[in-house]
Amino acid sequence: MAKNCYFCANNMRRIDYKETKNFEQFLDEQAKIIRRKETHFCVKHQKKLTQAIKRARFLALIPFVRQ
């Protein structure tokens, strides 16, 4: 199986914190960020995704934990 970055493959240049629907697939059951080894992202996009999720959490766009 090829380990290609989702964002590189789809030619997505920006990861915006306001697009919360895209983040749902990168969070597990407890709303934790899925690690890079499981998502197969490149380092650059994993860091940008993490930063965007943290910003969205701080602004209460997505929850910190799920019940």
Image (cartoon, rainbow, N blue to C red):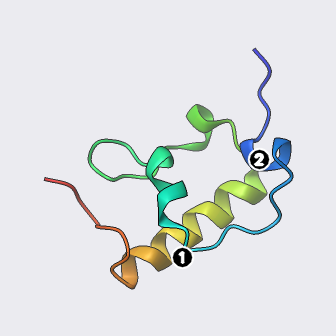
Residue at 39%, 85% in the rendered image: 59
- Residue 61: where, in percent of width, then height? 38, 76
Q: Is residue 59 left or right of residue 3?
A: left
Q: Is residue 28 left or right of residue 23?
A: left
Q: Amino acid at mark 2?
A: Cys
User: In this orientation, which residue lies closer to the viewer: 52 or 35?
Assistant: 52
- Tell me where residue 18 appears, x and y as whole percent: 54, 76
Residue occupying image coordinates x 84% and y 48%: 8
Farthest left residue?
A: 67
Instruction: Judge from the rendering whether residue 44 lies leftward or rightward of residue 61; answer left or right.
Output: right
Relative image position of residue 56 (x, y in whole percent): 45, 76
Q: How many marks?
A: 2
- In the image, 2 versus 43, the foreground residue is 2
- Which type of secondary structure does the marked residue at label 1 adopt? loop
Mark positioned earlier in the residue sequence (2 or 1): 1
Is 59 above or below relative to 41?
below
Residue 28 drawn above or below residue 61: above
Instruction: For label 1, count other residues whose C-alpha is less than 10 Å away and answer few (under 14), some (14-19) or many (20+).
Output: some
Q: Looking at the rendered structure, which numbered label has been put on residue 41?
A: none
Q: Nearer the viewer, mark 2 or mark 1?
A: 1
Q: Position of residue 43 (x, y in %)?
A: 74, 52
Q: Which residue is mark 2?
A: 42
Question: In the displayed structure, does residue 6 sit left or right of residue 9?
Answer: left
The residues bearing labels 2 and 1 have C-alpha atoms spaced at a distance of 21 Å
Q: Which residue is mark 1?
A: 18
Q: Quadrant of the N terminus?
A: top right
**What type is the residue that disc 1 sits on?**
Lys
Q: Residue at (73%, 42%) from the top-left corner?
A: 6
Query: Is residue 33 placed above or below 38 in the rendered structure?
Result: below
